[in-house]
Amino acid sequence: MPIIPELLSAIGAGSLRVVDLTNRLQASTPTLRLPAPFANLIDFSLETVSAYDEPGPFWKHANIRTGEHIGTHLDAPIHWISGRDGHDVSEIPPARLFGPAVVLDFSAEADADADFVLDVHHVADWEAEHGAFEPGTWLLLRTGWDRFSSDQEAFLNADETGSHTPGFTAECAAWLAARPEISGVGVETVGIDAGRGAELNPPFPAHFHLLGADKYGITSLQNLALLPPTGAAIVVAPLPIVGGSGSPARVYALVEAEAAAR
């Protein structure tokens, strides 16, 4: 049987589930807040132009205003100085936006310590149990942070010392960036670096190493608890913004129904 009809038949029959990994995009969607003197992006807003009225009697449409890195979004290489000569979001090869999804569940560790950072040994131990990454893999770090996805204060979890959210060590970021089988990483937090990533060497090492190595990042993911550790596929769909350093994105996973139920 040809592959595409088989895929569509499986989705229609419910034996292959489509799981939405995307946070809802609206004015209240939690976003990054940089301290002075750094500039922040504008939040998402929707401006109604017509709604079945005189400006448009038979239709409703609106203008949107948003920063590139708002809500669930993709980071392209040019987002960071280390990737400044790399792809903008419109230039990312489409095949790189599909791939196997592996879910590393460290939600218990992050629940115990909001500053938890994934290290090389965590990934190595995970691979020893679940198998090596396949070509084109997206590594998705599950921390349980999606439970804060509608609460700006809890999502950033900031105090006088800065933001406290989980992420990656500098050593882990460099190690993952050097692995050719990895296309990118995904997180449930506001950015691919830990909240205290500025204190590491280099600052914000996930951005520095991964984007500098032509890997991609996706943030503010939801529903990773519905995915198995291995066996799911990911689909990342950003807007092809010419010159864009990133884009809000719709992110899906394809999961066999039996695997999702485990």
Image (cartoon, rainbow, N blue to C red):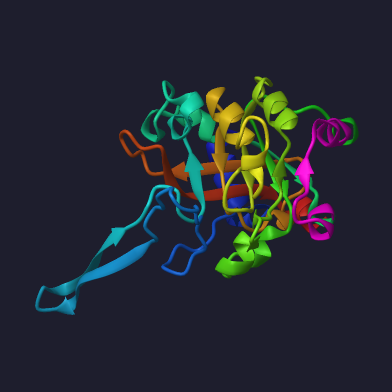
Going 61% across and 41% down the picture, which residue do you hit?
A: 198
Which quarter of the rendered picture does the C terminus lie within? bottom right
For the residue pair 259 and 205, the one nearer the viewer reads as 205
- Which image quarter: residue 125? top right
For the residue pair 241 and 162, the one nearer the viewer reads as 162
Going 50% across and 64% down the picture, which residue do you hit?
A: 24
Q: Main secondary structure of the magenta part?
A: helix
Q: Is residue 157 above or below residue 8?
A: below
Q: Is residue 43 above or below residue 100?
A: below
Q: Farthest residue toward the left? A: 54
Residue 78 lies, in percent from the top left, at 43, 30
Image mark count = 0
Residue 126 lies, in percent from the top left, at 85, 36
What is the span of residues highlighted in magenta in the rendered image? 109-127
Q: Is residue 214 visible?
A: no
Q: Farthest residue toward the bottom? A: 53
Residue 33 lies, in percent from the top left, at 50, 56
Q: Is residue 6 above or below residue 28?
A: above
Going 80% across and 31% down the picture, which residue do you hit?
A: 120
Going 86% across and 32% down the picture, which residue do you hit?
A: 121
Q: Any magenta on residue 199?
A: no
In this image, 194 relative to 2: left or right? right
Which quarter of the rendered picture does the N terminus lie within? top right
Q: Any magenta on residue 113?
A: yes
In this image, 127 relative to 219: left or right? right
Residue 208 lies, in percent from the top left, at 57, 30
Q: Is residue 187 visible?
A: yes
For the residue pair 194 and 233, the one nearer the viewer reads as 194
- Which image quarter: residue 218? top right
